[in-house]
C-alpha cells in the first residue's frame, strides 16, 4: 500500500480547521494566511487559508498541497475544504476536494429548509447523493473560531468541541488545553505566541496537535507527529510558502521490522504475535474470525492468526452489501462482469475464489504511483497496488450478492523498499462465507498468517488513517508458531511473496 491519504492528508484535513482560526479576535472582512509545511525540517508543501465575510455569511477556504515521493516517484497530494456559515457559526454549506496523483474526489453539502443536508459525493466521475442530519454539536471553521472566542486564553484552561471535517464527513471530539505564552521562531523572526494543545479523540486512539496563535487569534505555527516524524506548519509570506519542495521518500517510514524471517512454511501455518504499542490503551489490531487478540497489559497484545472461525467478529451489516462511492457494486458494467465470472459456481466460496483469480489477473501492471482509485476506475484503468485490487474485489463480491469489506493492516515481506524482513501496509478483502468472514488477497494471490488485520471498512480511504498512522508506534516483539486452530482451512492457492 502506498503512502496515500492516510498518514498525511487525512490527518491534516481533520486538524487543519483548528490550525486556521483560534481565539477571540475577529478577522478582517477578507483575510489570507500562507504557511509553509515542513517534515523533519524539509519543505514538502504549503497551506493557504482565505477568510471572507459578506454581510451575515462567512466563508472559510483552506487549501493544503504537499508533494512526497515513493521509490523516487512523485506523489502530489492536495486538499481543499470550504465551509459556509452565518455569523453565529450555524453551518449552511460545505465542500471538499481531494486530489492524489491523477485521482480526484469531491464532497459537497447544502443545508435544506428542513435543516437536513443534501450531500453529493463524486469519485471517479460518478456522483451519489444522500440526505444527512447535521451531527449534534458539530462545528465548521467559524463555529470553532467562536468557541475559541468565548473561551479565552487562561493558562491551564481545558475545554472541548466537536469538529466536522467536510472531506471525510467525520466528527471528532477535540480537547483543548491552554499552555500559555511562548517565544516562537518563524521564518520572519522570533515572536511571542499563545500555545494551545489540541487532543483529537477517535475510536482508534488520539492525535495531538500543538498550535501557537498571535494576538489576532490567527494560527502562526502548528506541529503534529505523523508516522513518527514531526510535521510543522509555519506562517510566512506567499513567496516562502510557494518555494520549491524538498522531496521526502516516506516508504521507509511505513514499515514495521520483523523479529525473525518468516519462511513460506511458517506463513502457511497459524502464528502467534506479541505486539507492543506504547502509550496507548486501545488495541492496534482487531478481532476477526481468523484473528484472536488478547490484552497482556502495559501496551502489549497477543495476536493469534489461523483458520477462520465463526462468531468472533460482527456478522454482516446492511452496509457490507450496499454500493457506495468507492465500491460501486450497482454499476451495470461491474454487475455484468461479476455475474460472468461467477457463472456456474457451486457456492459462495467458489464464487469468491473465481473472483479473486479474476482480479489477480486483471490488474496489470502492479503500480505504486496511483493516488487512490474506486472500483469503477480500476475497472476502466486496471493499474495500481493492493488497494486497487481490494476495492475491485470487494465491489465484485457485493455485485455477486456476497457481503464483503476491505481490510487494512500489514503483511510480511522478505524484502521491500530496500529493507529486509519487514511488515508493510497492505489491504485485502473479507467475504462472508458459510457463517464467518474469510480473507481473500487478490494482490498477493493468497492469504496466510502473515496478514495482520488492523481495521475494516467500506473502501473509503478514510479508514487507512486508522492504520498507517499507527506504524511508527508499533513493535512486533515476538513471532512463534501456533497450534492449528479449529475451523476450516483456506483453499487459496499459494504463490511466492512479493511486495504489496
Image (cartoon, helix red, strand yellow):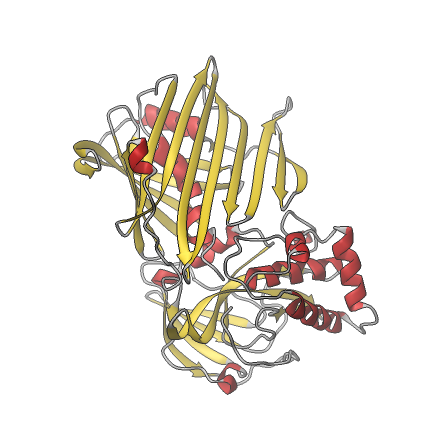
Q: Position of residue 437 (x, y in %)?
A: 63, 67
**Placement of 157 over or under 482, stated as above or below:** above
Q: Position of residue 239 (x, y in %)?
A: 30, 34
**Placement of 320 over or under 361, stated as above or below:** above
Q: Give the quarter of the image for residue 492.
A: bottom right
Nearest the viewer among 104 and 83 is 104
Q: Is residue 160 visible?
A: no
Q: Residue at x 38, y 27 (%)?
A: 145
Nearest the viewer among 482 and 351 is 351
**Placement of 9 over or under 180, stated as above or below:** below
Q: Residue at x 17, y 31 (%)?
A: 192
Q: Residue placed farthest to the front in the image?
A: 244
Left or right position of 339 against 190: right
Q: Residue at x 64, y 56 (%)?
A: 381
Q: Residue placed farthest to the right in the image?
A: 344
Q: Give the quarter of the image for residue 141.
A: top left
**Placement of 341 over or under 269, stated as above or below:** above
Nearest the viewer among 402 and 395 is 395
Left or right position of 484 against 217: right
Left or right position of 30 against 187: right
Q: Give the quarter of the image for residue 418.
A: bottom left
Q: Is residue 54 visible?
A: yes
What number of labels is visible? Answer: 0
Q: Position of residue 430 (x, y in %)?
A: 62, 65
Q: Residue at x 57, y 39 (%)?
A: 106
Amino acid at each position: 500500500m502506498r503512502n496515500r491519504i492516510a498518514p498525511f492528508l487525512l490527518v491534516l484535513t481533520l486538524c487543519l480547521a483548528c490550525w486556521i482560526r483560534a481565539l477571540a479576535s475577529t478577522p478582517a472582512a477578507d483575510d489570507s494566511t500562507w504557511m509553509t509545511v515542513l517534515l523533519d525540517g524539509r519543505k514538502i508543501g504549503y497551506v493557504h487559508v482565505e477568510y471572507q465575510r459578506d454581510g451575515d455569511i462567512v466563508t472559510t477556504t483552506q487549501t493544503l498541497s504537499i508533494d512526497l515521493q515513493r521509490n523516487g516517484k512523485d506523489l502530489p497530494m492536495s486538499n481543499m475544504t470550504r465551509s459556509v456559515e452565518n455569523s453565529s457559526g450555524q453551518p449552511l454549506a460545505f465542500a471538499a476536494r481531494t486530489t492524489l496523483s491523477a485521482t480526484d474526489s469531491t464532497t459537497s453539502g447544502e443545508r435544506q429548509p428542513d435543516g437536513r443536508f443534501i450531500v453529493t459525493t463524486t469519485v471517479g466521475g460518478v456522483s451519489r447523493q444522500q440526505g444527512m442530519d447535521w451531527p449534534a454539536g458539530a462545528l465548521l471553521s467559524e463555529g470553532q473560531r467562536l468557541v475559541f472566542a468565548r473561551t479565552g486564553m487562561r493558562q491551564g484552561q481545558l475545554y472541548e468541541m466537536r469538529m466536522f471535517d467536510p472531506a471525510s464527513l467525520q466528527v471528532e471530539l477535540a480537547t483543548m488545553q491552554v499552555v500559555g505564552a511562548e517565544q516562537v521562531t518563524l521564518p520572519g523572526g522570533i515572536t511571542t505566541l499563545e500555545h494551545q494543545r489540541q487532543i483529537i479523540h477517535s475510536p482508534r486512539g488520539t492525535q495531538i496537535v500543538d498550535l501557537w496563535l498571535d494576538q489576532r487569534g490567527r494560527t502562526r505555527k502548528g506541529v503534529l507527529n505523523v508516522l513518527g516524524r514531526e510535521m510543522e506548519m509555519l506562517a510566512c509570506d506567499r513567496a516562502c510558502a510557494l518555494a520549491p519542495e524538498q522531496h521526502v521518500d516516506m516508504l521507509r517510514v511505513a514499515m514495521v521490522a520483523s523479529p525473525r524471517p518468516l519462511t513460506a512454511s511458517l506463513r502457511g501455518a497459524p502464528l502467534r504475535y506479541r505486539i507492543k504499542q506504547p502509550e496507548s490503551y486501545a488495541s492496534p489490531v482487531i478481532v476477526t474470525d481468523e484473528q484472536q487478540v488478547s490484552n497482556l497489559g502495559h501496551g502489549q497484545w497477543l495476536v493469534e492468526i489461523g483458520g477462520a472461525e465463526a462468531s468472533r467478529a460482527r456478522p454482516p451489516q446492511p452496509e457490507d452489501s450496499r454500493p457506495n462511492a468507492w465500491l460501486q457494486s450497482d454499476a451495470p458494467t461491474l454487475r455484468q462482469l461479476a455475474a460472468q465470472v461467477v457463472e456456474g459456481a457451486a457456492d459462495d466460496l467458489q464464487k469468491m475464489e473465481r473472483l479473486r483469480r479474476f482480479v489477480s489477473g486483471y490488474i496489470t501492471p502492479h503500480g505504486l504511483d496511483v493516488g487512490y482509485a474506486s472500483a469503477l476506475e480500476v475497472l476502466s484503468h486496471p493499474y495500481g497496488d493492493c488497494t486497487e485490487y481490494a476495492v475491485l474485489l470487494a465491489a465484485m463480491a457485493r455485485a455477486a450478492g456476497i457481503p464483503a469489506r476491505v481490510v487494512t493492516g500489514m503483511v510480511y515481506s522478505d524484502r521491500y523498499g530496500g529493507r529486509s524482513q519487514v511488515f508493510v501496509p497492505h489491504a485485502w478483502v473479507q467475504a462472508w462465507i458459510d457463517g464467518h468472514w474469510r480473507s481473500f488477497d487478490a494482490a498477493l494471490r493468497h492469504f496466510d498468517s502473515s496478514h495482520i488485520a488492523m481495521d475494516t471498512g467500506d473502501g473509503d480511504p478514510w479508514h487507512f488513517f486508522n492504520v498507517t498512522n499507527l506504524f511508527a508506534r508499533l513493535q512486533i516483539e515476538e513471532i512463534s508458531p501456533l497450534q492449528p486452530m479449529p475451523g476450516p482451512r483456506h483453499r487459496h492457492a499459494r504463490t511466492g511473496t512479493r511486495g504489496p
